[in-house]
Image (tube, helix red, strand yellow):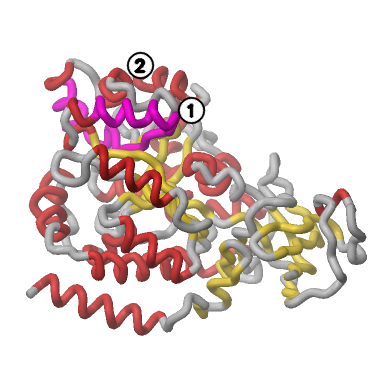
Amino acid sequence: MLRFYNGRVLSMHGDFEVHEDYEVWVQEDRIFYVGPALQAPKAGNKETGGSDFDGRFQEEIDLKGNLLMPGFKNAHTHSPMTFLRSYADDLPLQEWLYHRVFPMEDKLDPEMIYWFTKLAILEYLSGGITASFDMYAEPEANAAANVEMGFRTVLCGTLNDFKDSIPTLEHFYQKYNHYHPRIRYQLGCHAEYTTSEGLLRELGALAAQYHAPVYTHVSETKTEVEQCRKRYGKSPIEALADFGLWEYGGGGFHCVHISDADMDIMREKGLYAVTNPASNAKLASGIAPITAMQDRGIPIAIGTDGPASNNCLDMFREMFLVTALAKLREEDAAACPAEKVLSMATVEGAKAMGLLDCDCIAVGKQADLIVLDLHQPNMQPEHNIVKNLVYSGSKQNVSLTMVAGKILYREGRFSVGEAPEHIYETVKIMCKRLEA
């Protein structure tokens, strides 16, 4: 049993109240107790879910007034693309993707993907991210890296005309949903514009077979939407809905250029919009209509996108951009308040990824927690801690990151099974191999 005490707790369990002097106890990978300090509970105590406790803690962490909260959920990323960080910047999306990114990715092998994923995980942990929704080829290499480092990930299918097939996707779906407790898999395709109608319809049939949600890049650029209308006479969201992809939910990554009709479909199908503001801004793709989606009741999560287009895997920056760009788009400083953005980055992200036991701090939930240092200049004064997190928070405030009850990052040091310097050096070797 591990005890966090003498701090403040933002549980995100239905509200945004910061509880003073709350404690959180963790047993193995689950939250055992949340609430005011108390004596060791007896068997059957309702506050601990009826569990037993012998009164001994293996570790007690004095929060010293700092904040314990759920970890951030990076609801859209491409972790292995760390090798392309700052490699192909300042280019339009289509040129960036087809002439710089795809040719380099064709040279990758599973060993490279394994090490590039490990580098991304270090960045996630140092920024308070406790789970990623990762879309990339070679899921075995990705899954192995996550398991070895103690991280949690949901792998997303990458079906397209050049890679994978429906039988392969089904194999991955069955394998990685029974691979490890911290690994899950969701059906997905790269995008409408890289996947033929026949494959998309087969994907819809596979989703119906398993009653499974489907995820994909969608409506990221004006060009993408225009080309889809030329092919099908419909927007990407309308076309994919007609092909049967979303009969059991799912979501779209980006959702920048969407119409009222698109949003009606999203609401009807229960789709998540996963917004990626830094990537969309850097590639000049546009600003997603966050307020319009919120007004229609469409749930929204936040992702960094990959480190080739962002280039930073930083949810603090994403949170600020979500609200700032929404205010700018609407010309309304009251648009998209901080509380909603923080929920997108934690609770809604977990739900979008299907991690329903990782969304908040409550008894029985997964112990995916972070500690934020409030004794930093950017967190003072404490007029409103939640608004401080979104408007002035940064990775410098992350002092601890726990995944499944294991502390993987604390005060600048990683506990992931190997030295970060070894990962850095190996990544350099892999990059030189690609350049050869």
Q: Which residue is mark 1?
A: 298
Q: Is residue 365 visible?
A: yes
Identify which residue is drawn at 48% across, 28% down: 298
Q: Which residue is mark 2?
A: 261
Residue 432 falls in which quadrant of the image? bottom left
The quarter of the rendered structure image containing the N terminus is bottom right
Looking at the image, which is closer to me, 215 or 202?
Answer: 202
Q: Position of residue 8 (x, y in %)?
A: 74, 60
Decide if residue 312 is on the left or right side of residue 43. left
- What secondary structure do most residues of the magenta stretch adopt? helix
Labels 2 and 1: the sequence-earlier one: 2
Identify which residue is drawn at 37% across, 18% down: 260
Residue 251 falls in which quadrant of the image? top left
For label 2, the SS is helix
Q: Is residue 287 visible?
A: no
Looking at the image, which is closer to me, 393 or 435?
Answer: 435
The quarter of the rendered structure image containing the C terminus is bottom left
Q: Which mark is residue 226?
A: none
